[in-house]
Image (cartoon, rainbow, N blue to C red):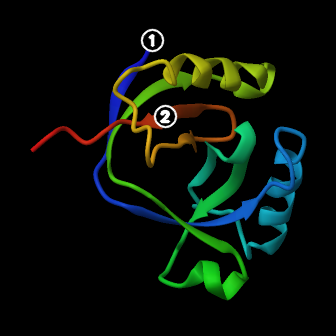
Amino acid sequence: MAEIYVIKDDIKVACVKALSFPEGIGGAWAKLFSLLPSQEGRKLYGISYGGEKGKITYMAAVEELHEGEADQLGLENFIVRKGNYVSEFLEDWRQDETQIAKIFSELLKDPRIDRNEGYCLEMYLNSKDVLCLVKLDAPNA
């Protein structure tokens, strides 16, 4: 069941863009892990958004441990924006990876999502659980 999840501060992440979607997702993660000195204590994210002609861009991402780490590792930069997200928790996603796409398909139906700068965000909580999130429009001031 979808709930509101709040990200309190912007999160700077280092990314590897998948060459294709969904086929290239595994390769993007493999490349990211090969470039990291260690995965220990790292927060992992999957970021996807629509592009030209309905093509989806996917990025495997890791939170920077220090300012400029993405540049040092030769990786792309991305900022996960603070704010409200509609979310759904998925336990043991490896049992059926297609559940992630199904959850995002439902979350994207929410009329409150940010249609301009929104994206789908996978927040890996541990080796088997993931929180699926979609950015909501900022409330009018």
Q: Amino acid at mark 1?
A: Met
Relative image position of residue 15 (x, y in whole percent): 67, 64
Identify the residue under disc 2: 133
Q: CA distance from mark 2 to mark 1?
A: 12 Å
Kindly identify which numbered label has been placed on residue 1: 1
Q: Residue at x 78, y 25 (%)?
A: 97
Whichever of labels 2 and 1 marks the residue nearer the N terminus, that label is: 1
Q: Amino acid at mark 2?
A: Leu
Q: Mark 1: few, some, or many residues within 10 Å (few <14, many ≥20)? A: few
Instruction: Work out whether 41 lies above or below 76.
Output: above
Q: Residue at x 79, y 74 (%)?
A: 35
Relative image position of residue 138 (x, y in whole percent): 25, 42
Q: Residue at x 71, y 82 (%)?
A: 73
Q: Mark 2: few, some, or many residues within 10 Å (few <14, many ≥20)? A: many
Q: Residue at x 59, y 81 (%)?
A: 69
Instruction: Work out whether 3 lies above or below 54.
Output: above
For residue 9, which quarter of the picture?
bottom left
Q: Is residue 102 visible?
A: yes
Split into 4 quadrants, where in the image is the N terminus? top left
Q: In the figure, is residue 1 to the left or right of 35?
A: left
